[in-house]
Image (cartoon, rainbow, N blue to C red):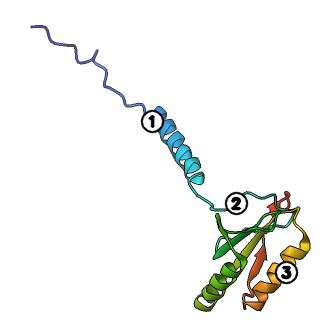
Amino acid sequence: MRLRDRKGFTRPEIIIIPMIDIMFFLLVFFMLSTLYMVNIKTVDVHMPKAANVETQMRVTYVVTMKKDGSLYLEDQPIAEATLLARAKAENARNAKFALVLRADSGLDYGKVYALLDRCKGAGITRVGLAGESAGGK
């Protein structure tokens, strides 16, 4: 029986550089894929653009007003009286209640102002207007 020469025998090597590349690729893949998993329940409208738009993550109610004046709470159509009653009850229950209005840019300003006035009459004081970023901050 012939034995191998121990000096001619090379030790196996584990090359970790390709493994590190694959791990970084998977990390980036999962980071980007989780960004698209966030489901924002809103109706698509063309909002006005502004340079100094802030992103607020703690919003209780997101209300969308389309060009025809119809209202949506998140992605469900809702009547104005029902919206005001539910928002008033939530405002009484939650001290940090906030309502954000996403209005179409082609909508008459009077309709937006009238809804904001009725919200104020219902006791809702923390109201914000949503807009799209025009590349400011």
In the image, which is nearer the foreground, mark 2 or mark 1?
2
Q: Is residue 124 above or below residue 31?
A: below
Count how many numbered circles sit on residues in the image. 3
Residue 137 in sight here: no
Secondary structure of residue under mark 3: helix
Q: Give the labeled residue for mark 2.
A: 43
Q: Residues within 10 Å of mark 3 (few under 14, many from 20)?
A: few
Mark 3 and mark 2: Cα distance apart in space = 21 Å
Q: Earlier in the sequence, mark 3 or mark 2?
A: 2
Q: Give the labeled residue for mark 1.
A: 19
Residue 110's image quarter?
bottom right
Residue 133's image quarter?
bottom right
In the image, which is nearer the foreground, mark 3 or mark 1?
3
Please state the horizontal and vertical placement of residue 34, each as a whole percent of the image: 55, 52
Q: Is residue 118 above or below residue 48?
A: below
Secondary structure of residue under mark 1: helix
Residue drawn at 78 percent across, 64 percent down: 66
Please state the horizontal and vertical placement of residue 40, each as a whole percent of the image: 63, 61
Please state the horizontal and vertical placement of residue 11, each as a whole percent of the image: 31, 25
Residue 131's image quarter?
bottom right
Residue 111 in sight here: yes
Mark 2 and mark 1: Cα distance apart in space = 43 Å
Residue drawn at 68 percent across, 71 percent down: 62
Quarter of the figure that contains the C terminus: bottom right
Q: Horizontal placement of 12 versus 94: left or right?
A: left
User: Mark 2: which amino acid?
Assistant: Val
Q: Are marks 3 and 2 in contact (CB under 8 Å)?
A: no
Q: Give the labeled residue for mark 3.
A: 114
User: Mark 1: which amino acid?
Assistant: Met
Q: Residues within 10 Å of mark 1 (few under 14, many from 20)?
A: few
